[in-house]
Image (cartoon, rainbow, N blue to C red):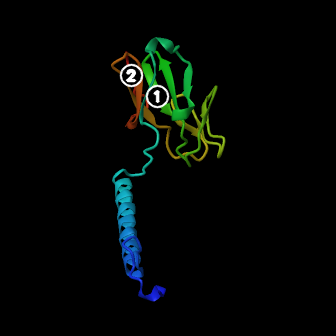
Amino acid sequence: MSKKNVPPQDSDMDRRKFLSVLGWAGLALSGIVALIGNLFYLKPAVSYGPATRFRVGKPDEFKEGIKELFEDQQVVVVREKQGFAAISLVCTHLGCTVRTSDAGFECPCHGSQFDNFGEVTGGPAPKPLNWYQISIAPNGELEVDKSVQVPGGTYFRV
């Protein structure tokens, strides 16, 4: 008996059935990939940056006349007789980080100089350093809000 006349068995798959199964499997796989892509789309991949509100400690922890530096937040908190002040460490000229000095603040990049209140005393800076709002958090700590600028010389009293 020759093999040409032997009918295919049920377990054998002919070419047409194989291609049909392969096509449906490809369609199912592409649907799964699209579904996963849409699920990732629902959660945006955004970096919101550092928080604009942060706590710096209890009021009793600050000594009068001492600049407490918070480098990660680019802010210095000062306690004076009038109260507390939060002054930015970002130069108003080109955004360099200023450093504290005995006379106030100085920009190492372009030479701007500021007094202890952030007012420009020399250099190319066009305006004084920003002052930020300070308040008391529910746990009794001082909280600086960098999203709210206050006029220079505005102190928070406890």
Q: Nearer the viewer, residue 5 or 46?
A: 5
Residue matched to label 1: 86
Residue 27 drawn at (x, y percent): 36, 70
| Picture layout, residue 28 above or below residue 36 | below
Q: Quadrant of the C terminus?
A: top left
Q: Nearer the viewer, residue 98 or 23?
A: 23
SS at badge 2: loop
| Picture layout, residue 46 above or below residue 74 | below
Sequence order check, earlier mark of 1 and 2: 1
Residue matched to label 2: 156
Residue 51 drawn at (x, y percent): 43, 36
**Cα gap from disc 1 to disc 2, whole angstroms:** 9 Å
Residue 34 drawn at (x, y percent): 36, 63
To which quarter of the image does residue 69 belong? top right
Residue at (40, 27) in percent of width and height = 154
Residue at (38, 52) in percent of width and height = 44
Mark 1: few/some/many CA within 10 Å (<14, 14-19, 20+): many
Q: Nearer the viewer, residue 150 or 29?
A: 29
Residue at (41, 74) in percent of width and height = 12
Residue at (38, 68) in percent of width and height = 25
Q: Residue furthest top?
A: 60
Three-letter residue code for mark 1 = Ala
Three-letter residue code for mark 2 = Phe
SS at badge 1: strand
Residue 28 drawn at (x, y percent): 35, 66
| Residue 150 falls left or right of residue 87 | left
